[in-house]
Image (cartoon, helix red, strand yellow):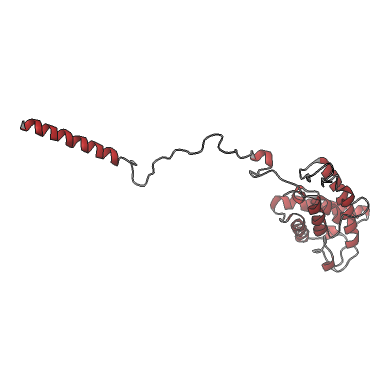
Amino acid sequence: MRRLLLTAALVVLSAGCSKSEEAKSGPSQDGTLEPVANPHQPGDFEPLPDPEAQGGSVGRAPRRLTVAQLDAAIQEAVGRRWGGSDGIDARATSLGRADFALVASENTEPNLVFAKFLEDGARVVCIGQAADEVKLTDASKRTLSRTLPGTWDDLRKLSSAQVNEFLVYNSLRFWGAPLEGEELTKWARFFTQAAARAETAKRRSDVLAVMCIAMLTDSRFITY
């Protein structure tokens, strides 16, 4: 009888020990965590867009400026409005502004029609502004050429530092971000070529006009 009691007691003790060991089982090493199951299942969320399809961006697709935003941005960056009988007001519907008769919301998707009319507008405002600025000797009254000397003639004579200063200043005006690195070098080369052609054509204002048109029609100016 005593043996039976001892045997039963040993069985109960061994069962209790095995349960306590199971309850205490955890990470095999100090400082490690138990793996947690992923609560998200396929279909619970939208996958991020392919960065390669969006110029490296993983956010929303770029949107272009509305007509009102474009109007204000041109005037701020260039120093004059795209006005006249063939200006932005006349082209507003073609540029995407809603007429609230057939179209109830403004189109802000980049497209070829918008790009074509923007190029026309860029030529008008940039050529006009450059022609005015070349006559001004007070640099503080100029917009595009504010960093150039008070009286300037042959822009091929500018130093590399002066060319870079001009490009950084205007890239900030047009895009809100300065040119730098290899891209700044490419734009400086473009400026030098434009200056050489302007001297050949005897139209020094063409340098300002060409740089203005290039920056105004760049995607960084019209999209956000």
**Residue in the foreground of this view, choosing between 168 and 37:** 37
Question: Which residue reaches farthest left?
Answer: 1
Question: Which residue reaches farthest front?
Answer: 101
Q: Quadrant of residue 35?
A: top left
- Decide: is 163 above or below 30: below
Percent across and percent down for residue 211 are 82, 53
Is 8 on the left or on the right of 176, as rendered?
Answer: left
Q: Quadrant of residue 19?
A: top left
Percent across and percent down for residue 100 are 83, 46
The answer to whether any part of residue 204 appears in the image is: no
Percent across and percent down for residue 209 are 86, 54
The answer to whether any part of residue 12 appears in the image is: yes
Give the residue at x 83% y 58%: 75
Q: Quadrant of residue 53?
A: top right
Give the residue at x 70% y 54%: 180
- Decide: is 214 above or below 133: above
Percent across and percent down for residue 139 are 83, 67
Count every numbered label the image shows and give the total: 0
**Residue in the foreground of this view, choosing between 138 and 10:** 10
Quadrant in which the N terminus is drawn? top left
Is 164 on the left or on the right of 126, as rendered?
Answer: left
